[in-house]
Image (cartoon, grey):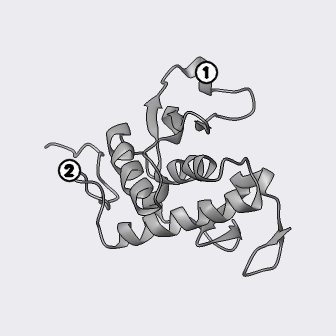
Protein backbone atom coordinates (compact mmCIF):
# COMPACT_ATOMS: atom_id res chain seq x y z
CA UNK A 1 0.00 0.00 0.00
CA UNK A 2 1.37 3.42 -0.95
CA UNK A 3 0.48 6.82 0.49
CA UNK A 4 0.88 10.33 -0.86
CA UNK A 5 3.98 11.85 0.77
CA UNK A 6 2.18 15.16 1.35
CA UNK A 7 -1.39 14.38 2.45
CA UNK A 8 -1.09 10.68 3.33
CA UNK A 9 -3.96 9.61 1.05
CA UNK A 10 -3.89 5.95 0.04
CA UNK A 11 -2.72 5.60 -3.56
CA UNK A 12 -4.21 3.02 -5.90
CA UNK A 13 -1.68 2.30 -8.65
CA UNK A 14 -4.44 0.76 -10.79
CA UNK A 15 -5.85 4.32 -11.00
CA UNK A 16 -2.52 5.74 -12.14
CA UNK A 17 -4.25 8.48 -14.14
CA UNK A 18 -5.11 10.11 -10.80
CA UNK A 19 -1.50 10.02 -9.60
CA UNK A 20 1.69 11.94 -10.31
CA UNK A 21 4.96 10.04 -10.54
CA UNK A 22 7.80 12.46 -9.87
CA UNK A 23 10.60 11.24 -7.63
CA UNK A 24 7.86 9.78 -5.44
CA UNK A 25 4.27 8.80 -6.12
CA UNK A 26 1.82 11.60 -5.28
CA UNK A 27 -1.93 12.12 -5.48
CA UNK A 28 -2.84 14.64 -8.16
CA UNK A 29 -4.23 17.05 -5.55
CA UNK A 30 -0.79 17.50 -3.96
CA UNK A 31 1.56 17.52 -6.97
CA UNK A 32 1.46 18.05 -10.73
CA UNK A 33 3.65 17.28 -13.71
CA UNK A 34 5.92 19.93 -15.19
CA UNK A 35 4.22 21.07 -18.42
CA UNK A 36 7.19 19.83 -20.47
CA UNK A 37 6.47 16.28 -19.29
CA UNK A 38 2.92 16.37 -20.67
CA UNK A 39 3.51 18.50 -23.78
CA UNK A 40 2.97 16.54 -27.03
CA UNK A 41 6.24 15.58 -28.70
CA UNK A 42 7.31 14.16 -32.05
CA UNK A 43 8.06 10.42 -32.16
CA UNK A 44 11.65 11.12 -33.30
CA UNK A 45 12.20 13.25 -30.21
CA UNK A 46 10.70 10.54 -27.97
CA UNK A 47 13.09 8.04 -29.57
CA UNK A 48 15.99 10.30 -28.58
CA UNK A 49 14.69 10.60 -25.03
CA UNK A 50 14.19 6.84 -24.87
CA UNK A 51 17.81 6.22 -25.88
CA UNK A 52 19.03 8.70 -23.24
CA UNK A 53 16.87 7.16 -20.50
CA UNK A 54 17.76 3.56 -21.38
CA UNK A 55 21.47 4.38 -21.42
CA UNK A 56 21.30 6.27 -18.10
CA UNK A 57 19.48 3.38 -16.39
CA UNK A 58 21.58 0.63 -17.97
CA UNK A 59 18.92 -0.93 -20.20
CA UNK A 60 19.09 -1.82 -23.86
CA UNK A 61 17.16 0.61 -26.05
CA UNK A 62 13.44 0.09 -26.49
CA UNK A 63 11.92 0.24 -29.95
CA UNK A 64 9.21 2.84 -30.45
CA UNK A 65 6.46 2.99 -33.05
CA UNK A 66 3.35 5.07 -33.57
CA UNK A 67 -0.14 4.00 -34.61
CA UNK A 68 -2.31 6.93 -35.69
CA UNK A 69 -5.47 4.95 -36.47
CA UNK A 70 -8.19 6.57 -34.30
CA UNK A 71 -10.28 3.39 -34.34
CA UNK A 72 -7.57 1.72 -32.24
CA UNK A 73 -6.93 4.38 -29.58
CA UNK A 74 -10.36 6.02 -29.15
CA UNK A 75 -12.16 3.90 -26.61
CA UNK A 76 -15.75 4.35 -25.48
CA UNK A 77 -14.89 5.85 -22.08
CA UNK A 78 -11.18 6.70 -22.47
CA UNK A 79 -8.27 7.10 -24.85
CA UNK A 80 -5.42 4.62 -25.25
CA UNK A 81 -2.12 6.51 -24.91
CA UNK A 82 0.46 3.77 -25.47
CA UNK A 83 1.22 0.16 -24.78
CA UNK A 84 4.47 -1.54 -23.80
CA UNK A 85 5.42 -5.03 -24.86
CA UNK A 86 7.79 -6.24 -22.14
CA UNK A 87 9.41 -9.23 -23.85
CA UNK A 88 9.94 -7.55 -27.20
CA UNK A 89 10.99 -4.29 -25.49
CA UNK A 90 8.93 -2.06 -27.70
CA UNK A 91 6.39 0.67 -27.12
CA UNK A 92 3.52 1.56 -29.41
CA UNK A 93 2.38 5.17 -29.04
CA UNK A 94 -0.97 6.59 -30.06
CA UNK A 95 -1.15 10.35 -30.79
CA UNK A 96 -2.61 11.38 -27.41
CA UNK A 97 0.27 9.62 -25.63
CA UNK A 98 3.26 11.13 -27.45
CA UNK A 99 4.52 12.74 -24.24
CA UNK A 100 7.53 12.29 -21.98
CA UNK A 101 5.35 11.21 -19.05
CA UNK A 102 3.87 8.42 -21.18
CA UNK A 103 7.34 7.36 -22.34
CA UNK A 104 8.46 7.08 -18.71
CA UNK A 105 5.29 5.14 -17.83
CA UNK A 106 5.88 2.58 -20.57
CA UNK A 107 9.65 2.31 -20.01
CA UNK A 108 8.93 1.56 -16.34
CA UNK A 109 6.83 -1.40 -17.53
CA UNK A 110 9.70 -2.63 -19.69
CA UNK A 111 12.41 -2.05 -17.05
CA UNK A 112 10.45 -3.85 -14.30
CA UNK A 113 8.56 -6.38 -16.49
CA UNK A 114 5.56 -5.59 -14.31
CA UNK A 115 2.16 -4.03 -14.66
CA UNK A 116 0.95 -1.40 -12.18
CA UNK A 117 2.82 -2.66 -9.11
CA UNK A 118 4.64 -0.72 -6.41
CA UNK A 119 8.00 -1.55 -8.03
CA UNK A 120 6.70 -0.26 -11.38
CA UNK A 121 5.38 2.92 -9.72
CA UNK A 122 8.69 3.67 -8.04
CA UNK A 123 10.58 3.09 -11.31
CA UNK A 124 8.14 5.39 -13.12
CA UNK A 125 8.74 8.07 -10.46
CA UNK A 126 12.54 7.67 -10.79
CA UNK A 127 12.39 7.98 -14.59
CA UNK A 128 10.25 11.11 -14.44
CA UNK A 129 12.58 12.70 -11.87
CA UNK A 130 15.60 11.94 -14.09
CA UNK A 131 13.91 13.40 -17.18
CA UNK A 132 12.80 16.43 -15.18
CA UNK A 133 16.42 17.24 -14.22
CA UNK A 134 17.37 17.12 -17.92
CA UNK A 135 14.45 19.40 -18.76
CA UNK A 136 15.54 21.88 -16.08
CA UNK A 137 19.05 21.90 -17.61
CA UNK A 138 17.50 22.16 -21.13
CA UNK A 139 19.44 19.03 -22.03
CA UNK A 140 17.34 16.87 -24.33
CA UNK A 141 18.22 14.64 -27.28
CA UNK A 142 20.53 16.10 -29.88
CA UNK A 143 18.60 18.22 -32.37
CA UNK A 144 15.69 18.94 -30.01
CA UNK A 145 15.16 21.64 -27.41
CA UNK A 146 14.13 20.16 -24.09
CA UNK A 147 12.12 23.22 -23.05
CA UNK A 148 9.98 25.19 -25.45
CA UNK A 149 8.08 28.42 -25.15
CA UNK A 150 4.46 27.96 -24.23
CA UNK A 151 3.74 29.44 -27.69
CA UNK A 152 5.88 26.94 -29.62
CA UNK A 153 3.91 25.45 -32.48
CA UNK A 154 1.21 28.14 -32.27
CA UNK A 155 0.86 30.03 -35.55
CA UNK A 156 1.68 33.72 -35.20
CA UNK A 157 -0.79 36.24 -36.57
CA UNK A 158 0.37 38.04 -39.67
CA UNK A 159 -0.74 41.62 -40.24
Residue 87 drawn at (x, y percent): 61, 36
Give the label on residue 64, or none: none
Write down the residue under mark 1.
Answer: 72
Residue at image location 61% in from the left, 27% down from the top? 73
- Say what secondary structure mark 2 lies in: loop
Residue at image location 39% in from the left, 45% down from the top? 46
Residue 97 drawn at (x, y percent): 53, 41
Quarter of the rendering containing residue 5: bottom right
Q: Which-is-in-front pick, marks 2 and 1? A: 2
Residue 154 drawn at (x, y percent): 30, 46
State whether residue 27 is above or below residue 79.
below
- Say what secondary structure mark 1 lies in: helix
Left or right? Give the position of 127 relative to 41.
right
Quick one: label 2 or label 1, which is nearer the N terminus? 1
Left or right? Give the position of 153 relative to 22.
left
Residue ranking furthest to the left: 159
Residue ranking furthest to the bottom: 6
- For the residues marked 2 and 1, what is the alpha-carbon distance in whole angstroms? 31 Å
Across the whole image, how many numbered discs are drawn on residues? 2
Residue 88 drawn at (x, y percent): 55, 33
Residue at image location 44% in from the left, 36% down from the top? 63
Task: Give the camera-side residue of 123 and 42.
Answer: 123
Where's the N terminus, which quadrant?
A: bottom right
Q: Residues within 10 Å of mark 2 (few under 14, many from 20)?
A: few
Write down the residue under mark 2.
Answer: 143
Amino acid sequence: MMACPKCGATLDLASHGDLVFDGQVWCDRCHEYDRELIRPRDLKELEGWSRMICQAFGFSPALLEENTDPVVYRKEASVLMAEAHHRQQFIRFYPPGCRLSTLCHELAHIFTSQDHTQEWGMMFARLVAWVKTRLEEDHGPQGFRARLSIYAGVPQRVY
